[in-house]
Image (cartoon, rainbow, N blue to C red):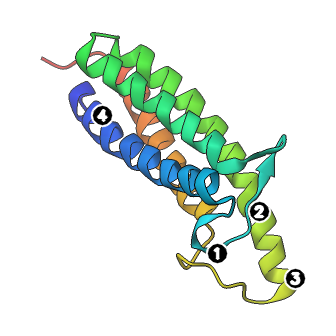
Amino acid sequence: MSPARYLRITFWLTLAGVLFSGYLSAVKLATGTCAFNESCPYFLGYPACWYGFVMFLAMFFLVLAARYRGLASRASAQWIAWISAAGILFAGQFVWRELVLWLSSGNPDYGLVFPTCVYGLVFYLAIFILSLVMLKRGSRPELP
């Protein structure tokens, strides 16, 4: 995968993450309730979606810096990989809690079929895998 292609794909994935987590955060901030009639998980006293918003926003700015300000693609991919790994652990533990709740209490009703944390986890996983592919590709010499 070329650095340009990596940055193009991660641009759209991180933008989608910013928009999705931003929407969830805005609804929580404006109404005091969580979007899609779901339970609202908290971490250290704050809604989990706020943390997701900050992580997606950080990755988005790293992609922008790499695309338009000349930050090395490898350096940005390393940072993005670390942030997305943290996002996987963060969202993953909330997904685990929801899975345990679902198994113990039956079939909860989610507005988007799955809990919103699942969608964040999918975005983090995709970004992480792409970053690893980019970093792995960068460790091999270029063919003429």
Circle number at residue 37: 1
The residue that disc 3 covers is 104
**Disc 4: CA contacts within 10 A as few (<14), some (14-19) or many (>=20):** some
Q: Is residue 75 visible?
A: yes
Q: How far apart, in angstroms, are the residues tagged by discs 4 and 3?
A: 41 Å
Q: Residue at x 55, y 79 (%)?
A: 113
Q: Earlier in the sequence, mark 1 or mark 2?
A: 1
Q: How far apart, in angstroms, are the residues tagged by discs 2 and 3?
A: 12 Å
Q: Residue at x 23, y 35 (%)?
A: 5
**Disc 1: CA contacts within 10 A as few (<14), some (14-19) or many (>=20):** few
Q: Earlier in the sequence, mark 4 or mark 1?
A: 4
The residue that disc 4 covers is 6
Q: Earlier in the sequence, mark 2 or mark 3?
A: 2
Rendered position, 102 above or below 77 = below
Rendered position, 3 above or below 108 = above
Which amino acid type is shown beneath numbered disc 1? Asn
Q: Earlier in the sequence, mark 4 or mark 3?
A: 4
Comparing labels 1 and 2, the label whose residue is closer to the camera: 1
Q: Is residue 87 left or right of residue 66?
A: right
Q: Is residue 140 visible?
A: no
Disc 3, SS: helix
Which amino acid type is shown beneath numbered disc 4? Tyr
**Disc 2: CA contacts within 10 A as few (<14), some (14-19) or many (>=20):** few
Disc 2, SS: helix
Circle number at residue 28: none
Residue 118: x, y in percent? 60, 62
Farthest residue, direction left: 144
Q: How far apart, in angstroms, are the residues tagged by discs 1 and 2?
A: 19 Å
Which amino acid type is shown beneath numbered disc 3? Ser
Q: Earlier in the sequence, mark 4 or mark 2?
A: 4
